[in-house]
Amino acid sequence: MALSDLNTVERNEAGIAAVLGLLKQRFGERFQTGQAIREQHAHTTTYIPVQAPDGVVFAENTPEVQEIVRTCAQHRVPVIAFGTGTSLEGAVNAPGGGISLDTSRMNRIVEVNPQDLDCTVEPGVTRHQLNDYLRDTGLFFPIDPGANASLGGMAATRASGTNAVRYGTMRDNVLSLTAVMADGKLVTTGKRARKSSAGYDLTRLLVGSEGTLGIITSLTLRLSGIPQAISGGVCPFPSVEQACEAVIATIQMGVPVARIELVNALQMRAMINYSKLDYPESPCLFLEFHGSDASVTEQAQSFGEIAAEFGGGQFIWTTVAEERNKLWKARHDAYWASLTLRPGSRGLSTDVCVPISRLAECIAETESDIAEMGLIAPIVGHVGDGNFHTLVLMEDGDRKDIELAEEFVARLNARALRMEGTCTGEHGIGQGKIGFIEGEIGVAGVDVMRAIKATLDPDNILNPGKIWPMRHG
Amino acid sequence: MALSDLNTVERNEAGIAAVLGLLKQRFGERFQTGQAIREQHAHTTTYIPVQAPDGVVFAENTPEVQEIVRTCAQHRVPVIAFGTGTSLEGAVNAPGGGISLDTSRMNRIVEVNPQDLDCTVEPGVTRHQLNDYLRDTGLFFPIDPGANASLGGMAATRASGTNAVRYGTMRDNVLSLTAVMADGKLVTTGKRARKSSAGYDLTRLLVGSEGTLGIITSLTLRLSGIPQAISGGVCPFPSVEQACEAVIATIQMGVPVARIELVNALQMRAMINYSKLDYPESPCLFLEFHGSDASVTEQAQSFGEIAAEFGGGQFIWTTVAEERNKLWKARHDAYWASLTLRPGSRGLSTDVCVPISRLAECIAETESDIAEMGLIAPIVGHVGDGNFHTLVLMEDGDRKDIELAEEFVARLNARALRMEGTCTGEHGIGQGKIGFIEGEIGVAGVDVMRAIKATLDPDNILNPGKIWPMRHG
């Protein structure tokens, strides 16, 4: 995680100058080089320094993406796909400069096939835009990473969020896609069948590739039916351990929870103050159940019984939408609530994910670390998957705070790997976790990634400097 | 599908001779070159001619697999992973000779983690073996391709089966794996986290790669809880169209069916005679529901109401295990029942999968084709996914029958692609469908597969001649 681990990418000044001229000529006002817009396209929510591209081009369709990539390829200039810029790991930074390819104007919903529960969209469509559009069809797209991210960016990051325990991640919900490769060719990874055994799984190769193998220009997504009924509620526990034990029992019993989110005591304190909640300042699970009227009641009751077995307090749940929405608004505002714990700070979000049998232990050790290091760092987690986030509050730009946070993150990631987990459940590697991927996948595995990258993008123009440490010489 | 489409792979006689000597010396009785055993290792259930390897080696652990691959690599000799030989598309044939690497002795269940709902197994473990082993844990592995295949082979083929509509395919149920690559190096694709965004999805790259990128030596699999209750039954329909409409409505309503299988009228006739069933000779849906006692009753009732809306006859269902088992035994014996429609014949199983909105049309056109061409070819389908199999009955080795079947399959696959589907939902490309993959994925996409293969296996030793047409010159 140390900043010194970030890859350097050499600037190709002559190539960049040539491409700036060509794109200006071709795209006019749709090509921008002002400092503010360039920095905005490299801005991320971490403390990683902004590395701005040299220009930003707003593509409007696939042939334009092909043209831009070909222009950059000809001059060996980096091209970095950009959706909404909500990456948490410096994924849109431009360490060697180059062109940010902004896909926000490629925001058409191309088709919806209600009978097949699928749709095809351009990459700049955001998840809110899609769900607003779908409302009348009785369908929805369940992946919810918190931010109103673009679907192209979510696919590139293999994003997930609160619903993943029930509906899976972007890995599971992209049926096929098209992408412009480094040579400008357009690849289609499949058709609309729900499953296929036709050759290598190019869809899954591109999902999670963080813009380093191709630029996604359309996605065919799997949709789900809006459940007939939803129930949800909150249950306090005396300890994180007991909450985690209740989670394990719930999953093992096969209760098909749609969401099961852990909030630790410090995070609850922040949320109670920020969102005016009437709950105790103890670890809580936030739950949601989807199904028929009878089924969501049965699920909530089953969970209530399990919670009681593991020392849980009263499980207060409801099927009334307004009450549920208030709860989930509080959960979604957890980030903002956290910041009030240290006014003026910004947060670094960690992202480990471990087998759920190790979750309680992992969180307990992490809380000890936080106390020992004197950090302010509340915890929320998609605990049905074993994934949790610690928000380390830092004074912006404070060197000592950054060093402490780096030390904390290094320990946390090592802990997750030791417990057979991952350093990133859903945020991606980007720049921020480059130092951890070889420890997780092993050098032989990362070398396979490098080999695939080298053969598909021999000049290393697609989002260079990300995912793994570069080999110099 | 024409046999003339099969790739030829040049034999490296000197290399093969050298490797035969080395393996005999090293593995003794565990290396076999008798004709019967060699042919048995290339035998598949299609009409594709047997292309036997030059020798069969029985590996017992990962270091041995590495040693065998390194020996073959050094002499540029093909090595073809073998599980149970239940491939339907000539996947284990050896068109350029070489070594069949039999994994059946690598059949240890390494660990089961009940709290995490996962297990780690060697590739030669079969699905029945695993499920027998798991019985006391309350867990099961849901992927059911019919045959008692090895889990390594199922992963390599991206297999699925009757439960996929609820539990997904091998794509969704392999958490991570280890594989020996063409250079003999061992790659681990991940740890045991339920989800991860750590770099390229090497797990999904290897799942479905048909032994052409690496030889799988262990798999960490996702398990499911054995449901508290199961209900199941059969519902007749006046037509395939009406049955398909009922399927679409069931999926759209969000009824979480565990199995929803279509059997057409001809197939029902064969099953009624073979398994002594008391049902009408009309298209039927076979269903199964998993959940709590209340939920499986509710699901069955919901389906009954939907079926009635679409002209379905009485939906007879039960939660009694013996009655359900009789039904599913009949469904699983469909292959044997079919063969009685043309005594002495063997069957060629097709495998298209289309968006379910096109399923009725696709089956109707296929039934017309069958009638027009004078074939005997009953149909069964995993219709919740849009996947169906036609079993074309042929006299073994009859030239005219083969030509007719090839013509039928070519039309069927073209029809599926026209309807935005795939030529293979779950059987893989192997040799049998090499002629269709470029039509499905496009040449640019298949070229990406070729590039990945060329960089990871530059001497083309891992299962050569499969998946796509080779480029000569």
Image (spheres, coloured by chain):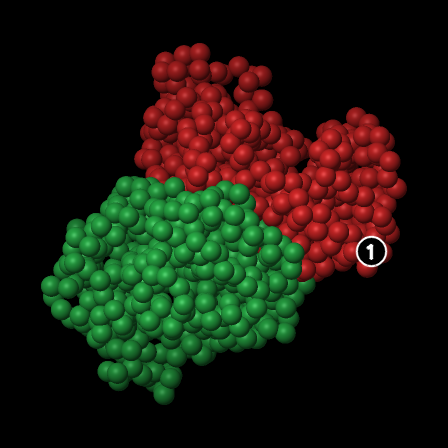
Chain colours: A red, B green
Does A13 appear above or below A363? Answer: above
Residue A446, image x, y percentages: 50, 52
Amino acid type of disc 1? Answer: Ala
Decide which of B175, A396 is in the foreground and name it. Answer: B175
Q: Is residue B303 visible?
A: yes
Name, please, the residue furthest toward the left. Answer: B400
Residue B286, image x, y percentages: 44, 59
Decide which of A355, A441 is in the foreground and name it. Answer: A355
Residue B78, image x, y percentages: 29, 68
Does B113 appear above or below B448? Answer: below
Which residue is at 40% across, 69% downward?
A: B277
Residue identifier under label 1: A308
Which residue is at 36% across, 88% downward?
A: B29
Mark 1 is surrounded, within 10 Å at the Cα level, by few (under 14), some (14 to 19) or many (20 or more) other residues, namely some
The image quadrant that residue B116 belongs to is bottom right
On screen, residue B206 versus residue A422, left or right, reads left
On screen, residue A256 versus residue B431, left or right, reads right
Decide which of A433, B7 is in the foreground and name it. Answer: B7
Q: What SS does tag 1 mark?
A: helix
Disc 1 chain ID:
A
Name, please, the residue furthest toward the bottom. Answer: B29
Q: Is residue A454 visible?
A: no
Which residue is at 47% across, 21% downward?
A: A105
The image quadrant that residue A113 belongs to is top left
